[in-house]
Amino acid sequence: MFSTGTDVTGIDVGPTARDAAEPHGTEGLVYQVCRWCGTASFRKLLCPVCASSDLESEHSDGHGVVVRSNVVNRYSRVMRNESLVRFPEGFVYRCRIVGAAPHLVTAGDRVRPVGGMTSEAGEVVLELCDPPRISDWY
Ligand SMILES: [Zn+2]
């Protein structure tokens, strides 16, 4: 659940900060596992395989791998990266990647949750585990 938002820490991370900066007690993500067929899903009301609503919440440490990197608003000041991230628990979700220039996030990069920025209902914010290779040194 969201609080009123008055306790936001003031970190300037853009216009969505109010949604994304909800302090969260536990690190990582909560995902769902279907009790019927065992399929893992994330933020779904029904199992994507058998459409059962009998889902059990499980906890993931939130570490994943970028499957497809996508830069949105490429030619504007609010350019950011939204990548499809595959989690070892078996689900894929579109997440916002920070900690690197948006165009330097590539498929295969390992990502992890940013402390306190992964909210229950807002967008999922992850950062690169390994900084991108610096290409401008000679
Ligand atoms: Zn199922």
Image (cartoon, rainbow, N blue to C red):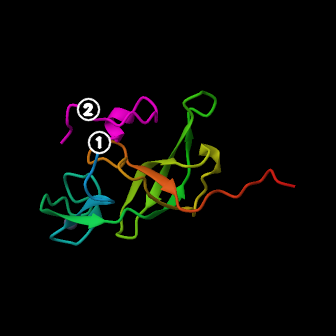
Q: Main secondary structure of the magenta part?
A: loop
Residue 105 position in % (x across, y down): 60, 52
Residue at 58%, 62% in the rendered image: 130
Q: Which mark is residue 22?
A: 1
Q: Is residue 99 above or below residue 26?
A: above
Secondary structure of the residue carrying numbered label 2 = loop
Task: Note whether ligand 1 is within 8 Å of mark 1.
Answer: no
Q: Is residue 6 above or below residue 41?
A: above
The residue range painted magenta reads 1-22
Q: Could you give the CA–CA distance between mark 1 and mark 2, rounded to whole angstroms? A: 7 Å
Please tell me which residue lies in front, 35 or 5. 5
Residue at 46%, 33% in the rendered image: 12
Crowd around label 2: few <14 · some 14–19 · many ≥20 (10 Å): few
Taking the magenta stretch, the answer to whether it contains residue 18 is yes
Residue at 46%, 57% in the rendered image: 85
Tell which quarter ligand 1 is in. bottom left
Which amino acid is tagged 1? Glu
Q: Is residue 120 above or below residue 5?
A: below
Q: Which mark is residue 5?
A: 2
Q: Quadrant of the C terminus?
A: bottom right
Q: Which mark is residue 1?
A: none
Residue 120 position in % (x across, y down): 26, 48
